[in-house]
Image (spheres, rainbow, N blue to C red):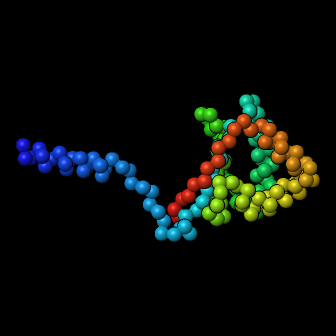
Amino acid sequence: MKKITLIIPLLLISAIIFSHPPDEPNPANLSDVSWHSIRLVEFESGSIDEVKQIIQKFETASVSAGIPPTSVRWFESGKYDLVVIWEMDQQPTVPDWNWNPQVDKWWNSFVAQEGSEEAAQKLQDQYTSLINSTVTNIARKSK
């Protein structure tokens, strides 16, 4: 009986200790991490070919602006059609990609590519109209 009395508390303590997964290690300081914006996009049904043509123009503007390319992956299953991942320059203060100083640089390149502010905005609006839903998250990765 004494052995059971000793074993049960040990089992309970072990269960408590090992039942919680370890937390992600915190880097010594936030300069030891890279920050990434991860956007999942669901497009309107039947619009993927048009979307791919527009995204190609977006990517061309990025290259012209000297901005590192985003990582783009097309899903084969699930609700979303596309995931776009790009590394951010600094730790974000809000989960909004518009804080990135490269946005202006990219936009200026895109306007030059399309020939005018109006043409660039029209294509941007066309792309936006093809989006059914999006989810954006911010992630960090230890270097």
- Marks counted in the figure total 0
Residue closer to the observer: 1 or 77:
1
For the point 12% across and 46% down, which residue is it? 5
Residue closer to the observer: 136 or 67:
136
Residue closer to the observer: 127 or 14:
14
One can see residue 114 in this view: yes
For the point 61% across and 50% down, which residue is it? 137
Image quadrant assignment for residue 30: bottom right
For the point 9% across and 47% down, which residue is it? 3
Residue 9 placed where, x, y %?
Answer: 19, 48
For the point 83% across and 41% down, which residue is it? 126
Residue 115 placed where, x, y %?
Answer: 92, 53
Work out whether 48 lies above or below 4.
Answer: above
One can see residue 63 in this view: no
Residue 123 placed where, x, y %?
Answer: 85, 45
Does residue 104 appear left or right of residue 138 in this picture?
Answer: right
Q: Residue furthest top?
A: 45
Work out whether 118 lies above or below 76.
Answer: below
Residue 65 placed where, x, y %?
Answer: 79, 61
Q: Residue furthest left?
A: 1
Work out whether 43 lies above or below 21.
Answer: above
Q: Quadrant of the N terminus?
A: top left
